[in-house]
Image: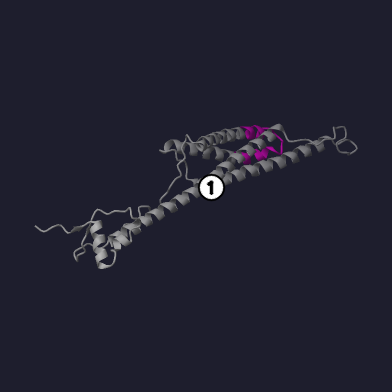
Amino acid sequence: MPADKTLGLGTLIRMSHKNGALPSAVSRSPSPSMRMPAFREASPSNDPPMYIASTIPENETIMPRTSSLSPWGRAKLILNITSIGNAIVTMVLTSFMASAPNDMTNAIGFFIAPPAAAAALWNVAELARRVDVPGGNGIHPGAHVGIRLVLCGSLITMASMITSLGFMSANTRAAYREVGPDGAVFVGGSGQKGDAPPVAWAIIAMCGVGAAIEFVLFVRACCEEDWRRKAIKRARREEMRKVECACGIRE
């Protein structure tokens, strides 16, 4: 009965020293710790080399996993809930201010409500996503980068507009209300110009808080997106290294 022509790694190395060269499989091994179970003698009936494709597709999505029990996981949860509450209070205040008649600052309330509602809906969607998906992963960080930046810019713009219009409206009312019979301005008054209503100041403060929260979440989303891209590159480099090692051994 013929013996099986199976050569171990030590046999291959000893035979290679006799022939004066190392086999390609050994010389291309990435590290001395790599061991193959067996090498068979080359023959015309052997199969051609097998090339292993990468197991990571081009559209693979690697999400940064943030544990809900980690410090940032708890902080992000608090920020999301705070943003929702802040947006609800902002919409209530704008509806209250818009209900007052004959005020130039009322119209701005209709412009503040949409970004506040959008911030609330986006944070609700983030919380729902973290609860629904196993592992606590939220919405894709790339989407957060764009949406958070738009929400932050919108809230800052609305706060600036209501500040300028509130001062303009208050100053105009004070001037007209204190015009005396002789045409002098502020006659019979305190000499001080009017100020924006307290509701307007509250809305400005709420917009500032909402913009600050969105900016913090925007910066964090940028960091997570950067980590995700680096993780994809590392995984693909590791897959390519494994493919090169496998192809070298088969040769």
Which residue is pictured at 30% across the width and 63% down the height? Answer: 24
Which residue is nearer to you in this view: 223 or 163?
223
Q: Which residue bears the numbered disc 1? A: 222
- x and y percent of residue 66 in the render? 47, 40
Query: In which quarter of the view is residue 107 placed?
Result: top right
With 106 as the anchor, is 52 left or right in this view? left
**246 is higher (above) or lower (below) than 120:** below
Q: Nearer the viewer, residue 81 or 9?
A: 9
Q: Is residue 101 visible?
A: yes
User: Looking at the rendering, in which quadrant would you find the N terminus?
Assistant: bottom left
Mark 1: few/some/many CA within 10 Å (<14, 14-19, 20+): some
Asked whether the viewer can see residue 58, the reply is no
Please, is residue 18 above or below residue 166 in the view? below
What's the amino acid at mark 1? Answer: Cys
Q: Which quadrant of the rendered structure holds the C terminus?
A: bottom left
Q: How is the image coloured?
A: one colour
Q: Residue at x 71, y 36 (%)?
A: 103
The location of residue 43, given as percent across then percent down, is 19, 65
Give the residues drawn in magenta, as a range.
92-113
Query: Going by the image, does 215 lie left or right of 8?
Result: right
Q: Secondary structure at mark 1?
A: helix
Q: Please check the rendered image and state whether residue 109 is part of the magenta-colored stretch, yes or no.
A: yes
Q: Quadrant of residue 42?
A: bottom left
Residue 208 point in image, percent of width and height: 64, 39
The location of residue 245, given as percent across then percent down, is 33, 58
Q: How many marks?
A: 1
Q: Main secondary structure of the magenta part?
A: helix
